[in-house]
Amino acid sequence: MSREFPGVALVGMGPGDPGLLTLRAAEALRKADLVIADRAGCPPEILAHCREDAEIVDTAEGGHLELAVRAAKAGRYVVRLFRGDPGLACDLAGEGGGLEKAGVPFQVIPGVSAVTGVPGYAGIPLTDADHREVRIVDIGEGGVDWDRFSSPDATLVVLGAENTVAEVAKGLIAAGRPDTTPAAMTTLGTTTEQETVVSTLQRLAADTKGMEAPAMIIVGDVVTWRDRLAWFETKPLFGWRVLVPRTKEQAASLSEQLREYGAVPEEVPTISVEPPRTPQQMERAVKGLVTGRYEWVVFTSTNAVRAVREKFSDYGLDARAFAGLKVAAVGEQTSRALVEFGVQPDLVPTGQQSSEGLLEVWPPYDEDLDPINRILLPRADIATDTLIAGLTDLGWECEDVTAYRTVRAAPPPAPIREAIKGGGFDAVLFTSSSTVKNLIGIAGKPHNVTVIACIGPQTAKTAEEYGLRVDVLSEKPSVSALAEALAEYGARRRATQIENGDPLRKPSQMRRGARRRR
């Protein structure tokens, strides 16, 4: 139980993008014993900041103010989450007043308000050199005197107008705003489902018909800045749902890169990495590393680095045990994993980042220069013999040690399987031939509208053998290059749609029955 602040923190979580959560809000969630939030409107990434033992209560259950009072008086630290900022279009006054009346100490942790966050993500500045005044109106309760908002020099931000767009426009025009006044409506702001329509007061209701809630209307000349300042919805993979079929540990960096391109990555493990059935072989290999049995150690994957690192930890060893050894790595990711371990690789392929690429730069054994001719290869149980054969031809003796086993993961949940086969994903990234085989084995073949991206020629060949059309092939066999190649494909596709005057539609919206987006 946290005693540092026995009371209630009224916390703003931002308008939708979990990345807009403030540092202070994240700290409060980490300390909280009880978190009260609207579960339907709270991104799971925000609740991920909570302790595992924290109690989370949905406001939909009702009575949350009374619950907060009881918990705080019992010495528990309570966090009450509000969407946006607690003091703007939220009930800070009501709930804060209730806590004060009950004698419960509280603090307010402001959040990024939708009033500033949503226009920022839509590329619309609320002020510029010619417009210095901003007026905000929440029309959720109705009864607005539009004459108070008739000044053409003020930017008007209208909240709660999802179902009354026509009434808002008519009211402003009747109050004296020209019907040609620029107006924009943004729905689901700051999320990857964000949609913005730019229009005029006269056309706004017709142009925004069918748009989803929550929505915000911005009225004024500042709306014209969007043509130059739109940055979020123009990302190359904006809103694309991208399947990342890798092990959970390997998917993190790739998913983060995809988010930077505007995508919504969904990680579906296709391979489960498990320890070898008999650990004695790895134990002997680690002992050989320490006693000078090997001249080289070759790492062909991040999983191999992790397996050796874990075995080192079991024996109380660290990177210093590699002193006097030469270390080779295949690929950027593997090299990075070694550096994080504290080991700087001596040899990394400069061209093709594969076993073949490593063999191209590997030196032949020279008995005068090399005191030992033995190489350790800690690898998967299903690794190919290409590397061993090539090193043997160069005069080296290889000890191929099973550092980990790869087994097919369990099938994903039914909604994921249905989305894969039904075209619910915009793209799928295949990072090896095994991910192709295993994904199809556990979930079925992706729909033909889904963009297929492969990390290299061999992976592409396997995908084609399974009847898939390969749309994207990375120039370099690295996951970073693969994500970049997909982003370039998305940018070209978007540019073509604009050039042809076609509506901007994601691949998943090309399938029959998909909801068409403006």
Image: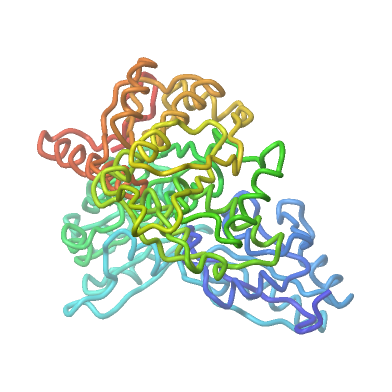
Q: How many marks?
A: 0
Residue in the foreground of this view, choosing between 65 and 410: 410
The answer to which quarter of the image holds residue 147 is bottom left
Q: Nearer the viewer, residue 414 or 357?
A: 357
Residue 292 location (% of width, % of height): 55, 60
In the picture, measured across the screen, residue 484 lies left or right of residue 162, that is left
Q: Is residue 266 left or right of residue 54?
A: left
- Vertically, is 238 above or below 122? above
Seen in the picture, residue 102 relative to 478 is either above or below; the reply is: below
In this view, the residue in front, 298 or 364, is 364
Q: Position of residue 482 (x, y in %)?
A: 32, 43
In this figure, which colouring scheme has been used for the structure?
Answer: rainbow
Quadrant housing residue 122: bottom left
Picture layout, residue 455 above or below residue 150: above
Residue 408 falls in which quadrant of the image?
A: top right
Q: Is residue 295 visible?
A: yes
The image shows residue 28 at horizontal and vertical percentages of 66, 74
Instruction: Judge from the rendering whether residue 95 lies leftward or rightward of residue 308; answer left or right.
Output: right
- Please say if 129 is above or below 407: below
The residue drawn where x is 89% and y is 75% is 74
Residue drawn where x is 65% and y is 52% of the image? 39
Q: Quadrant of the C terminus?
A: top left
Q: Residue furthest left?
A: 499
Q: Position of residue 83 (x, y in %)?
A: 55, 63
Q: Residue sitting at 60 percent across and 41 percent down? A: 404
Pick out the residue farthest to the front: 368
Tell me what residue is drawn at x 72 percent, y 81 percent: 106
Q: Which quadrant holds the N terminus? A: bottom right
The answer to whether residue 429 shows anywhere in this view is: no
Q: Nearer the viewer, residue 35 or 108?
A: 35
